[in-house]
Amino acid sequence: MSYIEKRARELLAAEVDRDAVAMPGVEEVATSIRKGGHGSVQFVPTALRAIIAALTPPEGYVLVPVEPTEAMLQEIHLVKSFTGEAMHRRYAAMIAARPEVLGG
C-alpha cells in the first residue's frame, strides 16, 4: 500500500468514524478500510480513488517542504556565494513563486 493510498484510507476511515454515533456498527467498516478492505460497502473503492486522485500531485509537479531539509541545504551549499540565511530567503522566494496547481 503506497503512502498516498494509506493516507486516503485514513482520511476516509476518519470520516466513517465521525458517523459512528449515528450509525451503529460502522466502526467495523472504518477498521476494514484502514486494513486495506472496503468494509462490504460498495462505494469505498470509488471514494478511495477520488481521495487518491485528490492527494496525488498533477503530472510534472512534486511536493516540497515549506522549510528546506538539511539534505536540501547541503545540496545548495555547492553554490559558494550563498550564506545560510540567504539560502533560506531564496528557498522561500522559490516556494512563493511556484505556479498554482489548477488540476490534474
Image (spheres, rainbow, N blue to C red):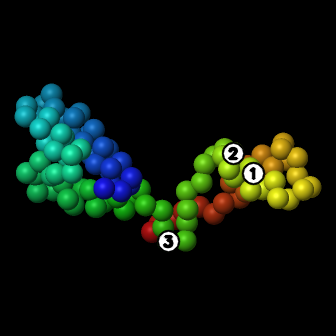
- Mark 2 vs 1: CB contact within 8 A: yes
- Mark 1 vs 3: CB contact within 8 A: no
Q: Position of residue 49 (x, y in %)?
A: 28, 61
Q: Position of residue 51 (x, y in %)?
A: 33, 55
Amino acid type, mark 2: Glu
**How far is disc 2 from disc 1 in space, using C-alphas?**
6 Å
99 w.r.t. 59: above or below: above
Between 64 and 71, which is closer to the camera in this rendering? 71
Task: Name the secondary structure under disc 3.
Answer: loop
Amino acid type, mark 3: Glu
Residue drawn at 16 percent across, 51 percent down: 37
Q: Position of residue 77 (x, y in %)?
A: 81, 53
Does label 1 or label 3 sit earlier along the sequence? 3
Mark 1 crowd level (few <14, some 14–19, many ≥20, 10 Å Cα) = few
Residue drawn at 55 percent across, 66 percent down: 61
Q: Position of residue 69 (x, y in %)?
A: 66, 46
Mark 2 crowd level (few <14, some 14–19, many ≥20, 10 Å Cα) = few
Q: Which residue is mark 3?
A: 59
Left or right, 84 with reference to 19 = right
Q: Which residue is mark 1?
A: 74
Task: Name the secondary structure under disc 2.
Answer: helix
Q: Which residue is mark 2?
A: 70
Q: Nearer the viewer, mark 1 or mark 3?
A: 1
Amino acid type, mark 1: Gln
